[in-house]
Image: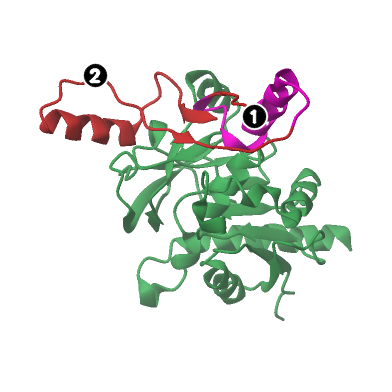
Amino acid sequence: MSERRPQIAVIVFPGSNDDRDAAWALHALGADPVLVWHGEPELPEVAGVILPGGFSYGDYLRCGAIARFAPAMEAVGRFAADGGPVLGICNGFQILCEAGLLPGVLRANRSLEFICRDTRVRVERADTKLTSRCTVGQTLTIPVKHGEGSWYADDELYAELVALDQIVLRYEDNPSGSMHDVAGVCNREGNVVGLMPHPEHAVDPLLGPADGTFVIASLVDAAREREQALV
Amino acid sequence: MLVRPKVGILDPQGQAVEGSLRQLGFAVGAARVGRVVDLELEATDAASARAEVERMCEQLLANPLIESFEIELVDA
């Protein structure tokens, strides 16, 4: 018997360009993706959300700074506050930070270059809703492609995040100069996770490493659980 | 509004500018690169204009984690 496909929203901003890859990966891993335009004030009936990669609003001002004011982001904020699983990938991570849903900020890579290559990230938390398929200490090979992925928090904020165990992924081969090798963080509750690597680009072994499956499938699991809990 | 990286925060753009200026033979110290936002605004007095622009900087134009801002008011 096949399991029910949970509905998961992929928010589409002007300038998003990984929205359809995210939808493709969700479909491949057992979910029904629903593309939601950023101007929508409400989310449809979904049990999970992806904020995809890209260059929302042309990255004007700062990455994610304008997208955070989109009507759909208010709905995403309510969904997150209700415990719904939210995954921000690359530009989606930048938006979540600017929106205050995740701690820190993403800045220009230390090299000032756009970096596009596979990276190795170590899993630090396997008990968030977006990493439940992983194990702590596991290394995932997932590509990055960004110019502004260098995560930053001041010492005080970083110490707080370590104390609260909010660092989810760290690079083993830091490509961006990200502070303390941070590649992904979560909110306190563990239902909102942002990461710079692109798990949606790494779900089909035909195209290279498929370790992104661990992240996307965790989201699908969390969405399925949420749907069942709401029935 | 002048928005720029806070003092003490690594500024790769500033470092690149600094390196290039040194290469040209200028004996410069640390450079920081920011941005200027010119804004037309109607207000009854300078204090209320400044207060409103401060709110703009805090909510959108600067990210307080990494950037500081300065405001200069000019009569049109």
At mark 2, the secondary structure is loop
Q: Quadrant of the C terminus of chain B?
A: top right
Q: Is residue A52 above or below residue A109?
A: below
Q: Which residues are magenta?
A: B43-69
Q: Nearer the viewer, residue B55 or A163?
A: B55
Which residue is located at x 65 percent, y 42 percent? A99
Q: Is residue A33 above or below residue B55?
A: below
Q: Is residue A82 above or below residue B54?
A: below
Q: Nearer the viewer, residue B57 or A82?
A: B57
Q: Position of residue A109 (x, y in %)?
A: 35, 42
At mark 1, the secondary structure is helix
Q: Which residue is mark 1?
A: B58
Q: Which residue is mark 2?
A: B29
In the rendered image of this protein, which colour is used for chain B? red
Q: Position of residue B45 (x, y in %)?
A: 75, 21
Display coloring? by chain
Q: Residues within 10 Å of mark 2 (few under 14, many from 20)?
A: few
Q: Position of residue A113 (x, y in %)?
A: 30, 49
Residue A129 can be seen in this image: no
Question: Could you tell whether A68 is left or right of B66 in the image?
Answer: right
**Is A192 one of the magenta-colored residues?**
no
Question: Could you tell whether A143 is left or right of A87 in the image?
Answer: left
Tell me how far mark 2 sits from mark 1, CA to CA.
29 Å
| Image quadrant where residue B59 sits | top right
Which residue is located at x 66 percent, y 40 percent? A101
Q: Chain of mark 1?
A: B
Q: Is residue B46 above or below residue A64?
A: above
In the rendered image of this protein, which colour is used for chain A? green
Residue A226 can be seen in this image: yes
| Image quadrant where residue A24 sits | bottom right
